[in-house]
Amino acid sequence: MGTSRSSPVLLALDVGNTNVTAGVFRGERLVKVFRLVTAAYPSSYSAALRRLEVGAVVYGSVVPRLDRVFERLSRKLFGVKALAITPSSPLGLKLRVRTPKEVGADRVLNALAARELFGAPAVVVDFGTATTFDCVSRSGDYLGGAILPGPHLASQALALHTAKLPLIEVARPRRVIGKDTKECIQAGLYYGYVGMIERVLAGTVQEMGCRPKLIATGGLAGMFSRELEFDAVSPDLTLQGLRLAYEKICP
């Protein structure tokens, strides 16, 4: 079903808490990207994936209940065993943290892709359901980082735990001083997150003792990079990490 036995068309699945991001690779080229809402029922994924013709599947997941779902779909739809990427996968990336098994697959993949594509040292800021900071040392090791709730979660929390504040879409406002409730929430979410990210990055760079490459990824990377100075904005970094991981394990 792929282009050849040695170079199959690769389906990479980044299974996140909010979305499942799927990428189709032909060699190193990412030819298709689409997102599916994270759900518990395989039928919602089967309809979207059955149209594809792929010869290999690799996935990284932070939603354990969906692991078997995608493993079954891989066998059923494509007749191949899906390769799961975890913190213990042999990627040549040393995890210099206290409990390596607790590191999310997405964070490992981001660190791997940053090192391989941009070089070390590096810091990846991933704007997802959670905003994560992941550090790669001069020698290419994973050092850890920081995690804070993403802006969408903050918006949901305001709506859920207050009587009069509505759920507001995260967007870059025209000004910091809002003139109505919507503008006030958007200003707080946007500029508040800019301030948090700046502070965490400043502390991270200071502790690393060097000037790392700063890389932004995730769904909101483009929006927040307008205010923050990144060396690169790579929305598909995690998918690239999945491709690189597959190539290391299945050369």
Image (cartoon, rainbow, N blue to C red):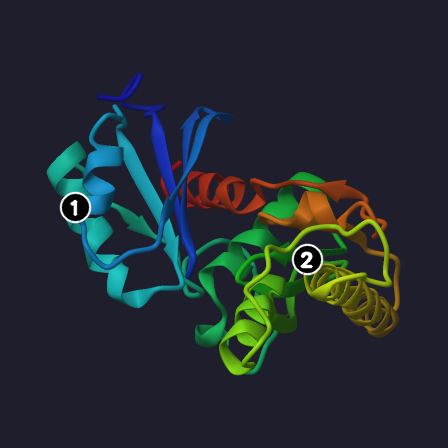
Q: Is residue 140 above or below residue 166?
A: above
Dot 2 falls on a residue whose secondary structure is strand
Q: Amino acid at mark 1?
A: Ser
Dot 1 falls on a residue whose secondary structure is helix
Query: Residue 251 appears at what percent x and percent y?
Result: 40, 36
Q: Check disc 1: other Cα within 10 Å, few if <14, some if 14-19, many if 20+.
A: few
The part of the image, by quadrant, that contains residue 90 is: bottom left
The residue at 58%/53% (across/down) is 110
Question: In the image, which disc is placed on residue 43?
Answer: 1
Apparent side of residue 34 relative to residue 44 in the rendered image (left or right): right
- Which image quarter is the N terminus in? top left
In terms of depth relative to the viewer, which is nearer, 89 or 34? Answer: 34
Q: Is residue 237 above or below residue 194?
A: above
Mark 1 and mark 2: Cα distance apart in space: 33 Å
Query: Residue 187 appears at what percent x and percent y?
Result: 77, 62
Q: Is there any visible trace of residue 122 in the rendered image?
A: yes
How many numbered circles does the render carry? 2
Apparent side of residue 6 relative to residue 139 in the rendered image (left or right): left
